[in-house]
Amino acid sequence: MEIIRRQEYLDKIEKVLGKGAIVVLTGQRRVGKSYMLKQLCEDKRADAMSNVIYIDKEKREFDSIRNYQDLNSYIEAHRHDGVTNYILIDEVQDILEFERTLRNYRTESDTEVIVTGSNASMFSGELTTLIGGRYKEIYIQPLSYKEFIVFHNLADNDDALLKYINYGGLPGLTRIGLEEEAVRDYQMDIYHTVLLKDVILRNKIRNVPFLENLVRFMADNEGKLISASSISKYMKSQGENITPSAIIGYQKYLEESFMLHKVSRFDIHGKRIFESNEKFYFEDNGIRNALAGGSREGDIEKIIENVIYQHLVRLGYTVYVGQLNAGEVDFVGVRSDGRRAYVQASFIISDDSTREREFGILHRIKDNYPKYVISMTPLLSRSDADGVTHLHLRRFLVEGL
């Protein structure tokens, strides 16, 4: 199979190398972190002045590396003098006290360290202290729409878009193909692996049936404003007596595994963030659809929202739900310099009432930041009216805002 490079991420990694920082690739399992590490490994092995020490903790041959002492011994046995040593470790969180090794080699002038991890809690604010220095986190997402059509050798058209929003962007689908049954089996396998390794075992969860019920509830209610209290009341009506604080804990574990993302509400006029009633979106749209029973009728708007949310993150925005007295704006994307973009998501703008609902809320925002409605309205590419830009979803995924 042809090796397709995700050059944007490789370029980000190269920019960090040589600057005394450890590179940490994060993201959900099976989004392509290992693939990225292998591409980097091949690039460096082609350089005579490089020595690559590659460790994949998902392979049996590395089972003997259980803790930092084992890791130190392996690295020392494979280091070379007079070249740049690249230490590449896949799923580093599976090595006990790995940060002690990272601290040891971070300051070596002839050594670069690049690791991957599938749990956000291991890369908390404490890691800088533990490793005694800087690290650069590079978040790897599933395939973008543009990557998806390249990986699957598809033309850029509405049929490809439907495949993307239905099946999601896990790179492994290139081996599976895009047949419904095979895709869903693969996605559920990934889901169970993430749930077991990065949620249940890592956090010693005992009430596994409730955890699975909660994930399916989140899939069914994707894009809705929900609170832990409302979930607790619903679960009680279904015979599950779970406290709101326990639900918040489970949600936090799911976020740390990168399976779910919490989106807080943002007061557009007051410029403050609310701490209750958030929305949740899935890392991979395909896994969400598999959990919800495929792409069901009536789900299309929440599926479109998930796709838009993930792409706004890919474009570098921190994303919130906008709150106005007059109603809710689907997304407020905020740049690091404070600039914003307002986005409404819709399936098809087919009548005046839908147009008023989607465009009217944006007209009520009295600032000069750009405002967008993104939909799948047929024959639309881009149009501008009264300060609001209407974009087709496919154009947004190809060209951005």
Image (spheres, rainbow, N blue to C red):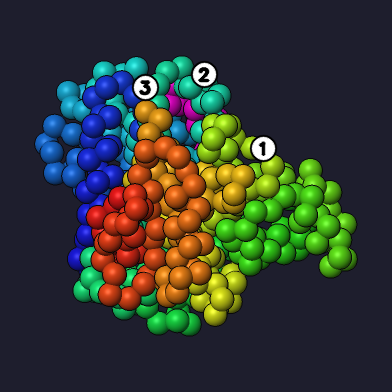
- Mark 1 / mark 2, whichever is N-terminal: 2
Residue for point 81% across, 55% down: 232
- Is the magenta region chiefly helix, strand or loop? helix
Location of residue 46 in the rendering, given as x and y in whole percent from the top left corner: 14, 44
Marks 3/2: CA–CA distance: 13 Å
Can you tell which mark lies on residue 106? 3
Q: Amino acid at mark 3?
A: Arg
Label 3 Cα crowd, 10 Å radius (few <14 / some 14-19 / many 20+): many
- Mark 3 / mark 2, whichever is N-terminal: 3
Residue for point 86% across, 61% down: 236
Q: Quadrant of residue 137?
A: top left
Would you say 246 lies left or right of 322 here? right
- The residue that label 2 is drawn on is 129
Location of residue 324 in the rendering, given as x and y in whole percent from the top left corner: 58, 44
Q: From the image, which quarter does the N terminus lie in? A: bottom left
Marks 3/1: CA–CA distance: 38 Å
Location of residue 13 in the rendering, given as x and y in whole percent from the top left corner: 28, 37
Span highlighted in magenta in the image: 95-106
Classify mark 2: helix, strand or loop. helix
In front of the other: 18 or 363 = 363
Identify whether 328 is placed above or below 157. above
In front of the other: 78 or 138 = 138
Classify mark 1: helix, strand or loop. loop
**Is residue 104 highlighted in magenta?**
yes
Q: Could you tell me if the residues under marks 1 and 2 are in contact, i.e. CB atoms within 8 Å? A: no
Residue for point 39% across, 43% down: 341
Label 2 Cα crowd, 10 Å radius (few <14 / some 14-19 / many 20+): few
Q: Quadrant of residue 9?
A: top left
- The residue that label 1 is drawn on is 275
